Amino acid sequence: MPGSMMLARRIKDAVIPATTGTMAVHPTGDSIVLTSSATDAALGAAFHEVVAASAITSEFRITSVVVHGFARAGRHDIFVYTGAASSEVLQGSFCVAAGATTDGFVVPVSMSNFPANTRVIMKVAHQDPSGGTKNCTVAINYVTV
């Protein structure tokens, strides 16, 4: 077998099993509202649970995050964590710059697979010199693997 065919077969064997499964959105009802800290823009506010520990019962990977419903224009830094309360581990972060409350984004993310029954939490930081809390709403798109 030619080398290029062997390489193509190896890529197929590595990629296709990792992307097969059920694609879904979570939560299926109302999205989760993230609220920033009124005093500490760099660290964000309290954690907001997006996926409860028992909500997704198969290994999964977050493929994108839907962000909308901004309370204020500006830069929103969103941090994604996993783990039990008081032992959260940062998995990744991204930022969106909203121009108005009608802006909405589907942000592709690249993260490792999470084991079944993993708790996913998020928080948001907003850079705004006027102070006060700022909100945005999130939901995740994920695939089971």
Image (cartoon, rainbow, N blue to C red):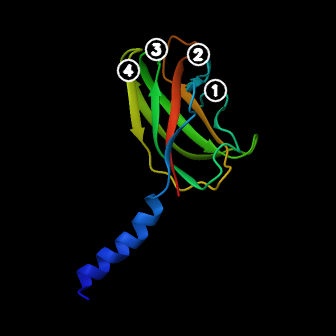
Among the two numbered marks 2 and 4 on one chain, the one whose residue lies closer to the N terminus: 4
Q: Position of residue 100 (x, y in %)?
A: 38, 15
Upstream in sequence: badge 1 or badge 2: 1
- Which quarter shows the N terminus? bottom left
Which amino acid lies under the numbered mark 4 shown in the image of this protein?
Asp
Image x and y of residue 14, in percent: 42, 70
10 Å crowding of disc 4: few (<14), some (14-19), many (20+): some
What amino acid type should be assigned to the residue bearing mark 3? Arg
Q: Quadrant of residue 84?
A: top right
Q: Residues within 10 Å of mark 2 (few under 14, many from 20)?
A: many
Instruction: Determine which residue is flagged by label 1.
Output: 45
Q: Which of the numbered marks, if any, corresponds to residue 133?
A: 2
Q: CA distance from mark 1 to mark 3?
A: 16 Å
**In the figure, is residue 1 to the left or right of 111?**
left
Can you give x and y, in whole percent of width and height, for residue 88 in the image? Answer: 69, 44
Look at the picture and state if 23 lies above or below 39: below
Residue 13, position in %: x, y?
40, 72
Tag 3 residue: 72
Q: Secondary structure at mark 4?
A: loop
- Can the viewer see residue 42 in this picture? no
Asked if the residue at tag 2 contacts the one at tag 1, i.e. Cβ–Cβ closer than 8 Å, the answer is yes
